[in-house]
Amino acid sequence: VTEPVALESIPSCFRGVIPSPFATCSPDGVPNVTYMSIVQYVDSDRVALSRQFFNKTRANLDANPASQVWVVDPETLEQYELDLEYLHTESDGPVFEAMRADVDAIASQTGATEIFRLRGVDIRRVLRCARAHHAHRNRWTRTHVTSRAYVCTGDTKFTFRLPARHWERRTSARPGRLKPSGPLAYSVLELHSCGS
Amino acid sequence: MVIDERARELLLAGSATVVATRDERMRPLLQRGWALAVSDDGQEVTVCVPAPQGSRMRENLESNGAVAITCSRPTTYRTVQVKGEVVAIRDLTPEQRVGAEAHADAFSREVEELGLPPGGGRRMFDNDLVAVTIAAAELYDQTPGPRAGARL
């Protein structure tokens, strides 16, 4: 079972840096997938999605409020899947204005002002937020430091273990040698006689 | 339907590939796809997707088989979507495994141009893939703009 993730804990995902895949489903069971330029945090239970140019998405949501969006942390590239339920659309107010500022910034960067014109903001309830499934999640690759260290003092051998937070997840069949992001603190794992 | 040469080029040019399925309650589900290929006769599309036994994705693929695949170029926003139903779920061939790895490398290089960390795109790659083949039924231009959603 994937642990739920609090929206407040992933603020970087809501800056609009990496476009978010967004899926809906028609009432007769045909999925549709497009990209959202921005998913905006509203509160601990809701997010806002820009409503710009989604013809099929719009029709699907009118008939079926269920959707899923993925947001990506631009610093760690960790992906999160959010199961959503459409609540309502806003075309003014603080959420809309905040979203418009973000969309305008993207439009000016890309030179596509008309394409990215904001038509409204869809407010959606977040039914579930969790890290996106990765089958390799439980396989780990070592950083350039060793995961265990051994030190003998007198007749006692200390075995130290590097805490899991300093390990990087495997991202391919050819694991890279990744550097830890900060100081390393080993914890004592075992004590043995040096002769053992 | 038959995917013609122009549509084939558009599909294969999209380095960011996303696959959507749905469950029996019409709830959509996303995954990233890799190494998309179009059959020689243009009637089928195969994509490698993380769908291990017991996963929601695998359950959706096996229970109703409705699939949408969107291929997009992050540097140009050019986007194409193909929809269809599953005709086969297979283990990856060695060639598909190599193709998926190559795709992940290409995707990673492209998103580096947009400012992501070197090699960062590969962090979205998943090793536990199956090859899902769909019979192509609909093809759409999904590029942001007024023509988004138009049939190709």
Image (spheres, rainbow, N blue to C red):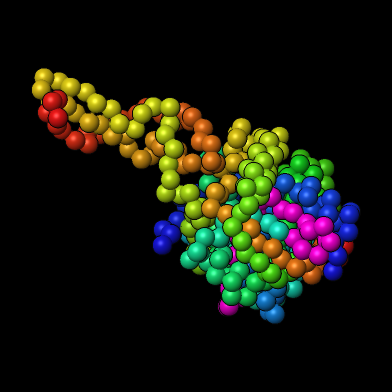
Give A193 or A45, whichever is nearer the viewer.
A193
A134 vs B80, left or right, is left
- Residue at point 64%, 43% (across, down): B98
- Residue at point 22%, 34% (across, down): A188
A101 vs B91, left or right, is right
Give A172 or A99, whichever is nearer the viewer.
A172
- Magenta span: B23-45
Question: Could you tell me if residue B96 is visible in this image?
Answer: yes
Residue B31: horizontal and vertical position, in percent?
Answer: 60, 58
Give B80 or A21, whichever is nearer the viewer.
B80
- Residue at point 80%, 68% (across, down): B138
Question: Could you tell me if residue A31 is visible in this image?
Answer: no
Residue B44: image quadrant is bottom right
Q: Is residue B63 above or below residue B6?
A: below
Q: Is residue A63 above or below residue B91?
A: below
Residue B145: horizontal and vertical position, in percent?
Answer: 83, 56
Q: Is residue A145 above or below residue B15?
A: above
B93 vs A155, left or right, is right
Residue A88: image quadrant is bottom right
- Residue at point 61%, 61% (across, down): B90
